[in-house]
Image: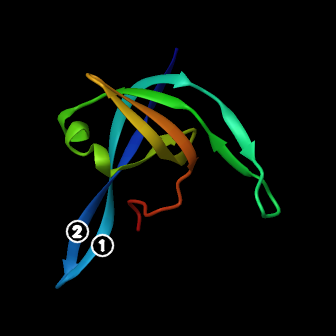
């Protein structure tokens, strides 16, 4: 089993001004194991096919992760942000399956 180190992006809703709420991304560094490593091309209506991965990452959960599971948005892998397609809690680990590239808000926004 290969080792993985990267960040997981969590979404938080922040009140930026009166009655205006925006999504803010908070990144936390985690370590774990790469449990599955596969890639696939998906046909699309566009010029280029879509590229996605079905990698599995198993991370030992901390209190922050366990209380914010529903806010997890992406995992970094090989320098890119990938959407979390599904997750499974198998205490003390959380097993994540990755999917398409993540194109949502980032901490720099």
Viewed as shown, does residue 37 lie left or right of 67? Answer: right
Q: Is residue 19 above or below residue 104?
A: below
- What secondary structure is found at the residue carrying circle 1? strand
Viewed as shown, does residue 90 lie left or right of 47? Answer: left
The picture places residue 52, in percent across and down from the top left corner, at: 64, 44
Residue at the farthest bottom position: 18
Mark 2 vs 1, N-terminal side: 2
For residue 14, which numbered disc appears in the image? 2
Which of 103/108 is in front? 103
Viewed as shown, does residue 105 lie left or right of 77? Answer: left
The residue that appears at 78% across and 63% down in the rendered structure is 45
The residue that appears at 52% across and 14% down in the rendered structure is 1
The C terminus appears in which quarter of the rendering?
A: bottom left
- Categorize mark 2 by other alpha carbons within 10 Å: few (<14), some (14-19), many (20+): few
The residue that appears at 56% across and 32% down in the rendered structure is 55
The residue that appears at 47% across and 62% down in the rendered structure is 104
- What secondary structure is found at the residue carrying circle 2? strand
- What is the spatial separation of the Cα atoms under label 2 and label 1, in whole angstroms? 5 Å
Q: Are marks 2 and 1 in contact (CB under 8 Å)?
A: yes
The picture places residue 5, in percent across and down from the top left corner, at: 44, 31
For residue 84, which numbered disc appears in the image? none
How many numbered markers are drawn? Answer: 2
Q: Is residue 14 above or below residue 44?
A: below
Circle 1 is placed at which residue position?
Answer: 22
Q: Is residue 91 above or below residue 20?
A: above
Residue at the farthest right position: 47
Structure colour scheme: rainbow
The picture places residue 70, in percent across and down from the top left corner, at: 30, 48
The picture places residue 93, in percent across and down from the top left corner, at: 32, 24
């Amino acid at each position: 089993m290969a080792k993985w180190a990267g960040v997981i992006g969590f979404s938080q809703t922040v009140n930026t001004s009166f009655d205006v709420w925006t999504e803010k991304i908070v990144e936390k560094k985690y370590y774990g194991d790469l449990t599955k490593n596969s890639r696939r091309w998906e046909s699309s209506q566009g010029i280029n096919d879509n590229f996605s991965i079905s990698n599995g990452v198993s991370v030992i959960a901390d209190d922050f992760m366990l209380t914010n599971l529903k806010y997890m948005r992406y995992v970094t892998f090989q320098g890119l942000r990938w959407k979390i397609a599904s997750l499974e809690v198998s205490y003390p680990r959380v097993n994540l399956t990755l999917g398409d590239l993540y194109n949502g808000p980032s901490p720099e926004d």
